[in-house]
C-alpha cells in the first residue's frame, strides 16, 4: 500500500515509543512504515568474569529473529550494531560491567538494519547511558533505472540492484557504519552517502522532538 | 546476568498482604490483569499484553516430509523462546528449567488436546505435509508467562492463513497469496491455560500471579481448558499437596476465565478481519499509542536532494582518479606468484642482494606498462614474464611440487636475515 | 604505536598506504577441485573448493549454490578457542557470502546441470593457518584464485537410468565473471588511515573498513562494522586505494594461472 504513493526520495512515516517495557532498564520500539523493531537495554550490571574488560563496559548485542533461531546473518548484523554502539557510547565510564542490548524483530518490511540502529539508539537514550553522540541508520536502494530510493520496502529491496545501509553520527554527519549489497559505482556510493546525510537530519530532528515531548511535563 | 534478588522484607510484605486478601496491584484474589490482543501486519502474528507481561507469537509453515509413524498428518512444532529482553535472568539459546516447563505445557495444551486438525495439513500422503511452527517470544516478564503464551499461541493459530497448494500429477505448486487466497487452519476448539498460585501450603490462592507473587509462591497449578469446560491438561508443580476440593474450585474458576478470554479472542479476531476487509492498515505500527507522552510519530517526509549529485561529484573529483599503473607481480615458479610495492619488506622470497635489481625490474615493468596502456594486458604481461624468467636463476626457485610448508621453512630463514639487514639502513 | 604513525611509518617499516608482500600459490591441495594458498605478510590463508552434485532447491530450480565457510582454528592464533565458530569467523563467512552474491563472480545459473534435477554445490572452505590481521582481504584473494583454479568434470545424465554419469577425463574450468578484490583499512582516532593492518594494528585501531572492488571499478562491498566515523572524502581515499589494489591482484592471479598453463 505504501509503494504506490511514496515518491523516490522520501522516508516512510516513522514512529517511536520509549519506555514501553517494565523489566529492561531502557526500551524502545521503532517503526518505519511497516517495519518494526523492539529494543531493550539492560545495564550497567554485573559482568561475567570471562567477558570482563578492565577499562570499559562489555557491550553485548542480541538480535532475535521472528521465526526460529538467530543465524549467521543475524550474527554479522549484531557485530555491525555492536561496533556502532561502542563507538558512540562512553563505555569507559562503566569499567568492568556489562551492557546488554536485545533487538526483537516485530515485522520486516525492508530497511531492517536501519530500523535496528534507530531502535537501538532510542533504547540507549531511554536507558540514560552516557553517549558521545547519537546515531541513526538510513537504508538506500538503487533500482534498475539507477534511481536512489531511501527507506525502501521489502518489495523495493527485492527489485533493487544495490542496497546500502549507513549509520550516521549526529555530530559531523560522518559515516559510522556501512554495509552494502550488490555492485555499484563510486559515484552512486557518494550520492547515497549524501542522501543519507540529508535523511539523517530528519531523523535526528525526530529524535529531538520525541525527547522534548517526553520531558515536556517534567519541566 | 543475574536477576535482581528479592529482599526478605519484600517477601514478608507480599505474604502478609496476601494473608490480608490484598494484592500489590490492587486486584482481588480471582482477578485477571487486563488482556490486550493486537495483531501484526502478516497473518499469524499476535501480541498479547497481560498487564505488563508481553509476549509475541508468530506462526509459520513449511512443506516437509511427514513422520513415518503418521504419514498422513501434518506436524505441529512449538517453541517458546525466553528472550533476554524479557528478563535479565534469561539467556539466549540456553534451555533452562523454566523454558522446558513452558514448552511442555504449551505442547500438552495445544498439540495433545488435538485442537487442530492435523490431517487437513496433509498434501501428499507419506511425502509432503505442512509443518506448522509456532514461535512464542517473551518480550517482558511480569509473571504468568504461561497464560499469556497460550493465549498468544492459540490466537495466532486462529489468525494464521497457510498458502493454498495445487497438485497436478506429482508436481506440487504453492500458490502465492496474490494468486489464490490463503486458507485458515481448521481448529476444533481453543484450549487456554489458566495459572493458580498457592501460598502458605495451599491456604491462599491467587489467579494470574505477577512476577513478585510468583517469586514467593509455594506451588503452581496450571489448568488448560476450552470453553466447553473440557479440561485439556492439568499440571501441578512446586511440590504442594492439594485437596480435591481445591482442584475442583480451581477448575470452576478456570471455566469462567476461559469463557471470558475466548470471547475476547473472538472479538479481537473479528475486529481484525473487518479492518483488513476494509483495506485499512493494521499491524504493530498502527497499534502504537498516539496519546502517550513517550510516543511520537511523524508522517512521510520528503527530502530536498537537489545538491546531492553536486556534492557527490565534488568528493569524487577531489579525490582524483586512482593511478592506472600497478607494479607487476613476480612469478618465481609456476603456480607461485608474489606482489609487493616499493621496497621489499621483512617477508619475501627474494634474497637481500636482489632487492635493487628487483626494484629496477619493477620500474621497467611500470614503464613498459605505461607505453602499452593497461588495456593491452597480454603484451604487458608477456614482457613481465620475461623479466621474471630472467630472474629465476638467482631467485630461490620453488617448483610447484614443493608444498607450502617447505616454502615457509625456506623463507623464514631468509626472513630473519633480511629483517636484520633491512632495518639498519632505514634508521 | 601512535608515535610511529606521526612519523608516517609503521612498526614493520611500511608506509601507511602500503600492503605487505602478497604471495599466491594455486593448486596447493591436489585432492580438491580447486585450491589456493595466500600469504599476506605473515597471514596465511588456504582455500579449498569441493564440488558436489546435489538437487537444486524448489525455490530456485535453475540455480546451483556456493557455500563459503571461514574457519579460524586455534592453530592460527592464541585468540581463538576450539569449539563452534566464534563471532569473527561467522561474520567473515557472512561477509564472503555477501561478496560472492554482490559481485556475481560466478553466476548461480552456470552451476546448474539440469534444471530442477541436478546442480553443482561448491563448498569453499577457507582456513586460516596463521593469523596476523587482515584476513578478509586474504580470504577474498584465496577464494578468487581457488575458483579460477577449479576444474569440474563433465556430467551427463543418463537418459535411461536418470542417474548422473561423471566423466572425469573431460574437465573444464568455471566461468569467472568478475574479479572482486578487497582492501582493508584501519582507522586510528585522529583519522589516520592505514592499509592492510597486522593483528597488532587491528587490535589497537578504533575502526576497520573493507572495500571490495571489481575490474570495472564498481564497488561490490563497503563494509564498515561501526567504529569511529569517517567522512565521505576519507572513504573516497580508501576506494581509490582499493581500485589500485584490485588491478595489482588481478594481474597477479592472471600471471600465476598463466604460468601454470604454460608449464603444462
Image: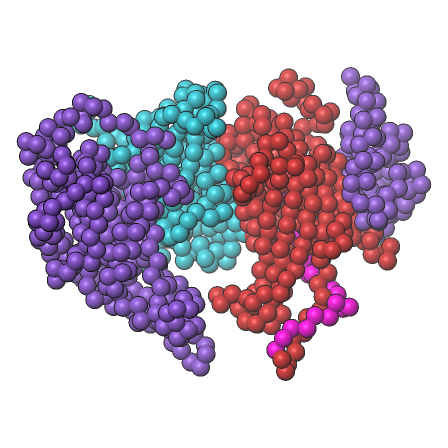
- Residue drawn at 77 percent across, 29 percent down: B345
Q: Nearer the viewer, residue B229 or B270?
A: B229
Q: Going by the image, does A147 lie left or right of C9?
A: left
Please give the letter of the chain rendered in red. C
**Magenta stretch?**
C162-183
- Is residue B387 rendered magenta in the image? no
Q: Going by the image, does A23 lie left or right of A84?
A: left
Q: Is residue B252 visible?
A: yes
- Residue drawn at 58 percent across, 60 percent down: C65
User: For the N terminus of chain C, which image quadrant?
Assistant: top right
> Residue C5 falls in which quadrant of the image?
top right
Q: Going by the image, does A56 lie left or right of B184?
A: right
- Which percent across, then down, holds residue B165? 37, 73
> Residue B231 falls in which quadrant of the image?
bottom left
Q: Is residue B228 above or below residue B18?
A: below
Q: Nearer the viewer, residue C133 or B369?
A: C133
- Which percent across, then down, holds residue B127? 43, 72
Please give the letter of the chain rendered in cyan. A
Q: What is the display colour for chain B?
A: purple
- Which percent across, then down, holds residue B147? 21, 48
Amino acid at each position: 500500500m505504501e509503494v504506490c504513493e511514496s515518491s523516490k526520495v522520501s522516508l516512510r512515516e516513522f514512529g517511536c515509543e520509549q519506555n514501553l517495557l517494565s523489566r529492561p532498564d531502557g526500551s524502545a520500539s521503532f517503526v518505519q512504515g511497516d517495519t518494526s523493531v523492539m529494543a531493550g537495554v539492560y545495564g550497567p550490571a554485573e559482568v561475567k568474569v570471562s567477558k570482563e574488560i578492565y577499562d570499559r563496559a562489555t557491550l553485548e548485542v542480541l538480535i532475535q529473529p521472528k521465526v526460529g533461531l538467530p543465524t549467521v546473518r543475524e550474527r554479522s548484523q549484531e557485530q555491525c550494531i555492536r561496533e556502532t554502539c561502542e563507538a558512540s557510547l562512553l563505555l569507559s565510564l562503566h569499567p568492568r560491567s556489562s551492557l546488554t542490548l536485545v533487538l526483537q524483530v516485530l515485522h520486516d518490511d525492508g530497511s531492517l538494519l536501519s530500523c535496528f540502529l534507530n531502535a537501538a539508539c532510542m533504547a540507549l537514550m531511554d536507558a540514560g547511558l552516557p553517549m558521545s553522540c547519537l546515531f541513526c541508520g538510513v537504508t538506500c536502494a538503487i533500482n534498475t533505472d539507477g534511481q536512489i530510493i531511501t527507506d525502501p520496502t521489502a518489495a523495493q529491496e527485492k527489485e533493487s540492484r544495490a542496497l546500502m545501509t549507513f549509520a550516521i553520527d549526529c555530530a559531523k554527519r560522518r559515516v559510522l557504519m556501512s554495509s552494502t549489497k550488490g555492485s555499484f559505482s563510486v559515484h552512486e556510493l557518494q550520492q547515497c552517502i549524501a542522501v543519507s546525510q540529508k535523511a539523517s537530519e530528519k531523523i535526528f530532528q525526530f529524535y529531538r522532538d520525541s525527547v522534548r515531548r517526553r520531558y515536556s511535563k517534567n519541566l | 546476568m543475574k536477576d535482581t534478588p528479592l529482599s526478605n522484607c519484600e517477601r514478608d510484605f507480599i505474604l502478609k498482604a496476601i494473608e490480608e486478601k490484598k494484592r500489590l496491584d490492587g486486584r482481588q484474589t480471582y482477578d485477571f490483569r487486563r488482556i490486550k490482543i493486537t495483531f501484526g501486519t502478516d497473518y499469524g502474528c499476535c501480541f498479547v499484553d497481560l498487564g505488563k507481561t508481553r509476549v509475541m507469537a508468530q506462526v509459520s509453515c513449511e512443506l516437509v516430509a511427514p513422520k513415518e509413524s503418521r504419514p498422513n498428518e501434518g506436524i505441529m512444532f512449538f517453541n517458546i523462546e525466553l528472550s533476554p529482553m524479557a528478563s535479565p535472568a534469561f539467556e539466549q539459546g540456553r534451555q533452562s528449567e523454566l523454558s522446558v516447563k513452558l514448552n511442555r505445557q504449551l505442547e500438552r495444551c495445544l498439540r495433545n488436546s488435538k485442537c487442530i486438525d492435523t490431517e487437513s495439513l496433509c498434501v501428499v500422503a507419506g511425502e509432503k505435509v505442512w509443518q506448522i511452527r509456532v514461535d512464542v517470544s517473551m518480550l517482558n516478564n511480569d509473571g504468568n508467562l504461561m497464560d499469556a503464551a497460550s493465549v498468544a499461541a492459540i490466537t495466532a493459530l486462529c489468525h494464521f492463513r497457510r498458502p493454498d497448494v495445487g497438485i497436478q500429477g506429482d508436481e506440487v505448486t504453492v500458490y502465492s497469496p496474490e494468486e489464490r487466497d490463503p486458507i485458515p487452519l481448521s481448529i476444533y476448539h481453543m484450549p487456554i491455560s489458566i495459572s493458580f498460585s498457592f501460598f502458605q501450603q495451599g491456604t491462599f490462592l491467587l489467579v494470574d500471579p505477577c512476577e513478585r507473587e510468583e517469586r514467593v509462591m509455594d506451588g503452581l497449578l496450571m489448568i488448560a481448558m476450552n470453553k466447553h469446560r473440557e479440561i485439556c491438561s492439568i499440571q501441578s508443580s512446586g511440590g504442594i499437596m492439594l485437596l480435591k476440593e481445591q482442584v475442583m474450585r480451581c477448575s470452576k474458576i478456570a471455566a469462567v476465565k476461559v469463557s471470558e478470554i475466548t470471547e475476547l479472542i473472538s472479538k479481537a479476531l473479528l475486529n481484525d478481519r473487518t479492518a483488513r476487509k476494509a483495506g485499512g492498515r493494521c499491524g504493530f505500527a498502527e497499534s502504537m499509542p498516539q496519546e502517550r507522552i513517550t510516543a511520537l510519530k511523524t508522517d512521510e517526509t520528503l527530502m530536498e536532494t537537489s545538491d546531492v549529485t553536486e556534492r557527490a561529484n565534488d568528493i569524487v573529483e577531489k579525490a582524483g582518479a586512482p593511478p592506472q599503473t600497478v607494479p607487476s607481480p613476480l612469478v618465481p615458479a609456476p603456480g607461485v606468484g608474489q606482489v609487493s610495492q616499493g621496497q621489499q619488506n621483512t617477508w619475501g622470497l627474494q634474497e637481500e642482494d636482489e632487492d635493487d635489481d628487483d626494484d629496477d625490474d619493477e620500474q621497467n615493468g611500470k614503464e613498459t606498462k605505461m607505453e602499452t596502456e593497461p588495456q593491452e594486458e597480454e603484451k604487458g604481461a608477456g614482457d613481465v614474464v620475461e623479466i621474471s624468467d630472467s630472474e629465476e636463476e638467482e631467485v630461490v626457485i620453488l617448483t610447484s611440487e614443493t608444498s607450502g610448508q617447505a616454502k615457509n621453512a625456506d623463507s623464514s630463514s631468509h626472513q630473519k636475515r633480511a629483517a636484520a639487514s633491512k632495518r639498519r639502513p632505514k634508521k | 604505536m601512535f608515535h610511529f604513525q606521526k612519523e608516517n611509518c609503521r612498526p614493520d617499516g611500511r608506509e601507511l598506504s602500503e600492503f605487505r608482500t602478497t604471495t599466491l600459490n594455486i593448486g596447493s591441495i591436489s585432492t580438491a577441485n580447486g585450491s589456493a594458498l595466500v600469504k599476506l605478510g605473515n597471514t596465511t590463508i588456504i582455500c579449498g573448493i569441493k564440488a558436489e552434485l546435489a538437487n537444486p532447491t524448489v525455490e530456485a530450480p535453475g540455480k546451483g549454490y556456493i557455500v563459503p565457510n571461514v574457519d579460524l582454528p586455534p592453530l592460527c592464533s592464541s585468540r581463538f578457542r576450539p569449539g563452534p565458530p566464534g563471532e569473527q569467523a561467522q561474520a567473515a563467512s557472512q561477509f564472503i557470502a555477501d561478496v560472492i552474491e554482490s559481485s556475481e563472480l560466478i553466476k548461480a545459473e552456470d552451476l546448474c546441470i539440469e534444471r530442477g534435477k541436478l546442480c553443482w554445490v561448491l563448498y569453499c572452505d577457507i582456513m586460516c593457518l596463521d593469523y596476523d590481521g587482515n584476513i578478509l582481504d586474504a580470504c577474498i584473494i584465496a577464494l578468487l584464485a581457488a575458483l579460477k583454479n577449479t576444474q569440474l568434470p563433465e556430467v551427463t545424465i543418463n537418459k535411461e537410468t536418470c542417474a548422473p554419469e561423471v566423466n572425469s577425463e573431460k574437465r573444464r574450468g568455471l566461468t569467472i565473471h568478475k574479479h572482486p578484490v578487497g582492501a582493508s583499512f584501519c582507522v586510528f582516532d585522529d583519522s589516520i588511515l592505514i592499509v592492510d593492518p597486522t593483528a597488532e594494528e587491528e587490535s589497537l585501531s578504533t575502526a576497520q573498513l573493507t572495500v571490495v572492488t571489481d575490474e570495472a571499478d564498481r564497488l561490490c562491498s563497503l563494509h564498515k562494522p561501526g567504529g569511529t566515523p569517517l567522512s565521505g572524502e576519507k572513504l573516497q581515499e580508501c576506494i581509490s586505494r582499493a581500485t589500485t589494489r584490485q588491478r595489482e591482484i588481478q594481474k597477479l592471479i592472471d600471471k600465476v594461472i598463466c604460468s601454470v598453463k604454460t608449464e603444462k
